[in-house]
Image: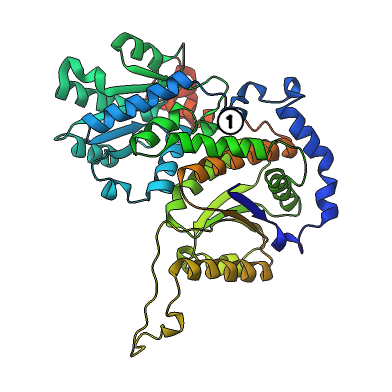
Amino acid sequence: MSIKVNFDLLKSFVTDKDFESVIPALNIAHGFLYENNVNAPGNHAHGWLDLPINYDKEEFARIKAAAKKIQNDSKILVVIGIGGSSLGARAAIEFVKGKNYNFTCGKLPKIFFVGNSMSPAELNEVVGFCKDVDFSVNVISKSGTTIEPAIAFHIFKKLLTEKYGDKANERIYATTDAVKGTLHGMALKEDYERFVIPDDVGGRYSVLTAVGLLPIAVAGIDIDALMSGAADSREKYSVCSLDNDCYKYAVARQLLYRSGKAIELFISYEPDFLLMNEWLKQLFGESEGKEGKGLYPSSAIYSTDLHSMGQYVQDGARILFETVVHFENSKSEIEIELDEDDSDGLNFLAGENLSSINKRACIATALAHTDGKVPNIIINVDGMDAYNLGALIYFFEKACAISGYILGVNPFDQPGVEVYKKNMFALLGKPGYEELRAELKARI
């Protein structure tokens, strides 16, 4: 298996007795996902559990075919979505293909993600990229009414129609609800190719559905390997035991939270993990941040951020711990060559590989921060390919669900997100929000 978690640097913060004290709560959390599912908060959203082996094979084949068509007829794919409808796919593409994918993709389509803000500058920039080339759109929304992607789709649909006329619908791929919603109705009426967001899989858990798989496949990533990695994680992390690294990580998070650690800082030494950090922040923040509870998920890329936030982590308020995702094998290698004059003073590194130096920076930093009373959990992963990505996605999804249930919250709802939406609709004058609009205007 490609993932192994090292808890050695927790020993001075969390004891074996502490871990054992959480076993009753762990058993309850595990039961909520399996034998006691009927009583579990959010039990309607457990479809991700068996998704790596129990997915729609016919739709999977259509995803591959659609990806091939987009690769053949488009220079750009515009992915329209927000939150779980865009973060997972973008994170996956950068993880496997690199954060400079659009510069290195060759004959594959460039992929731009929009509909995740209401910045006119961002939208206009991508519109400009699309005007003179062939492009397609993948619009992703369960309802079709979320304002940010709805506005973006309104703009890009108009551009497609101007460019391709009555053939525009052949370049629109809608990933939405199977039977209802504004986008579903539009897709039926205008004959877009449709892919399904399963009812029993929430947005932040949806990267292994069509939500993530279509853009990922367009980028030339092996989605069979992706699902295989997730399937192997599903098998490995199915047993309720502290010998299960996924469950032990979930328990460790809660023990550290109970000890006064308020922030989990997700760390990687690979810049291509930057968007995975963002995905993790949504996964854990939206799942656990409710009822006045929950760790605050933050992130950093080392060694870059050691030169900006390193001082705080080492010597600031002792309110955080680090979860470090470390990769054993780099995508490529650089060797430090001998300089006869040693003008830069680096001859002591001659013959060293940069990945080896990076690894020792990771070890040195973990030891320094642990000495500074910042607990470290090290998640070691073989490499940054599709298989390892699938394994890692499932590992974190499972850990998040277990952790949330131990915390005592429903890890599958997000009631707080709806508050700003209602206020925004009211202030924008959407029909049906007149009373709230009057109330808000009185306050401002």
- Name which quarter of the figure residue 391 lies in: top right
The image shows residue 318 at horizontal and vertical percentages of 67, 62
The image shows residue 65 at horizontal and vertical percentages of 34, 25
The image shows residue 349 at horizontal and vertical percentages of 45, 79
Q: Residue furthest top?
A: 189
Q: Is residue 129 visible?
A: yes
In the picture, measured across the screen, residue 58 lies left or right of residue 235, that is: left
Question: Is residue 429 placed above or below 404 in the rendered structure?
Answer: above
Q: Residues within 10 Å of mark 1 (few under 14, many from 20)?
A: some
Q: Foreground residue, 315 or 33?
A: 33
Q: Secondary structure at mark 1?
A: loop
Question: Is residue 242 placed above or below 64 in the rendered structure?
Answer: below
Q: Foreground residue, 160 or 151?
A: 160
Q: Is residue 143 visible?
A: no
Q: How is the structure coloured here?
A: rainbow
In the picture, measured across the screen, residue 262 lies left or right of residue 90, that is: right
Tag count: 1
In the picture, measured across the screen, residue 156 lies left or right of residue 285, that is: left
The image shows residue 414 at horizontal and vertical percentages of 58, 30
Q: Amino acid at mark 1?
A: Gln
- Name which quarter of the figure residue 30 lies in: top right
Q: Foreground residue, 88 or 293?
A: 88
Question: Is residue 231 placed above or below 170 in the rendered structure?
Answer: below
- Name which quarter of the figure residue 194 lies in: top left
Question: Is residue 309 placed above or below 239 in the rendered structure?
Answer: below
Residue at image coords 70%, 34%: 409
Residue at image coords 44%, 48%: 95
Q: Which residue is mark 1?
A: 414
- Image quarter (top left, top right, bottom left or bottom right) of the C terminus: top left
Residue at image coords 54%, 39%: 229
